[in-house]
């Protein structure tokens, strides 16, 4: 099942922002919820016959003054059919190699229009669409006029893998861009362009980052894998994939409190149905706020 709709749009301060559902993905439910027992997570999300749950791969497009800015790029088109089957990835496009191009097209943009691509981290389902494999096998930048940005520590981590981390980092997703001189590495919290701030959110990977977008006092926060779906809002509901789950816990504690205090619109990358929502704390746990 490919989660729909392809594109959802709203206003954030002076800017239009668009959630582009770059495809479906299915991952093992146990791995997605870490130490949470199946009888608990199954009440929130159903598992298929292979114990997998349906996820999305939502990218965020911001119509910024400098031009369209894209956060994360989905899974791309460079892996084998077998690989996409294992991860339940359904992202083939109608107007280009992937659904990300379809979404951009629906919004009236082409890949050449994107001026900046920001990666939350470099796992294949977040940075796979950074590059595209042409029919002759050549790997090229998907966005020929864009600069790309990620945390320097994440780039180092992605290029120095071990037996556990190697399965998520594929050099064709980032090395051709670095070699071409278009991948900029930033360190720690910093404003990447006016109104878009990188906030280190370690835990899933040591240098994972969220993106805080601010326009005219309105805030949105792209959570990426810190809180991949709305079901991951409770503090201990942490993915088994995280390399430092107790660091994730402290990052969540800090970020979710700020999100409530400062009324951030949360953007959920992997949720199959909910693109964004504000959140509340009911005295016990974090949950969506119904407005
Ligand atoms: Zn990841």
Image (cartoon, grey):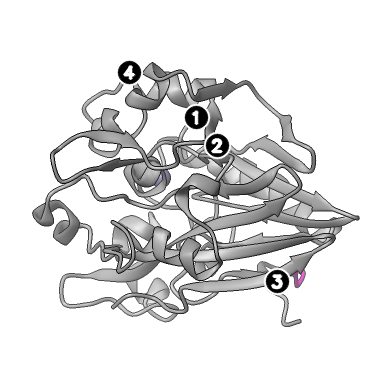
Is tag 3's residue or tag 1's residue first in the polypeptide sequence?
3
Camera-nearest label, 3 or 1: 3
Name the residue carrying label 4. 160
Magenta span includes 214: no
In terms of secondary structure, where does tag 2 sit?
A: helix
The relative height of residue 36 versus residue 64 in the rendered view (above or below) is below
In terms of secondary structure, where does tag 3 sit?
A: strand
Using the image as rendered, state which of residue 96 and residue 233 is in the foreground: 96
Residue 32: x and y in percent read 36, 58
Please name the predominant secondary structure of the magenta segment in the image. strand
Q: In which quarter of the image is residue 248?
A: top right
Name the residue carrying label 1. 206
- Estimate the spatial distance between the alpha carbons at disc 4 and disc 3, rounded to whole Å: 39 Å
Name the residue carrying label 3. 10
Q: In this view, does 144 lie to the left or right of 133?
A: right
- The quadrant of the rendering that contains the N terminus is bottom left
Name the residue carrying label 2. 247
């Amino acid at each position: 099942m490919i989660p729909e709709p392809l594109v959802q749009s709203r206003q954030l301060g002076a800017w239009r922002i668009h959630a582009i559902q770059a495809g479906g993905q299915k991952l093992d439910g146990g791995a997605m919820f870490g130490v949470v027992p199946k009888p608990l997570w199954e009440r929130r999300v159903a598992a298929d016959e292979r114990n997998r749950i349906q996820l999305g791969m939502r990218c965020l497009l911001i119509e910024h003054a400098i031009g369209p800015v894209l956060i994360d790029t989905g899974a791309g088109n460079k892996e084998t059919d077998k690989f996409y089957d294992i991860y339940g990835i359904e992202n083939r496009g109608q107007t280009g190699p992937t659904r990300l191009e379809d979404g951009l097209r629906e919004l009236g943009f082409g890949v050449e229009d994107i001026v900046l691509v920001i990666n939350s981290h470099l796992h294949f389902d977040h940075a796979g669409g950074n590059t595209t494999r042409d029919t002759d096998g050549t790997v090229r930048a998907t966005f020929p006029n864009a600069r790309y940005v990620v945390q320097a520590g994440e780039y180092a981590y992605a290029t120095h893998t071990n037996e556990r981390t190697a399965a998520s980092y594929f050099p064709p997703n980032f090395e051709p861009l670095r070699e071409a001189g278009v991948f900029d590495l930033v360190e720690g919290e910093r404003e990447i362009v006016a109104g878009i701030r990188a906030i280190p959110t370690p835990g899933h990977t040591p240098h994972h980052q969220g993106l805080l977008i601010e326009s005219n006092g309105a805030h949105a926060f792209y959570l990426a894998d810190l809180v991949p779906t709305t079901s991951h809002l409770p503090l201990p509901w942490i993915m088994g994939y995280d390399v430092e789950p107790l660091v994730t816990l402290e990052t969540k504690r800090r970020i979710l409190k700020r999100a409530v205090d400062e009324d951030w619109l949360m953007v959920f990358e992997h949720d199959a149905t909910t693109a964004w929502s504000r959140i509340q704390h009911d005295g016990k746990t974090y949950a969506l706020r119904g407005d």
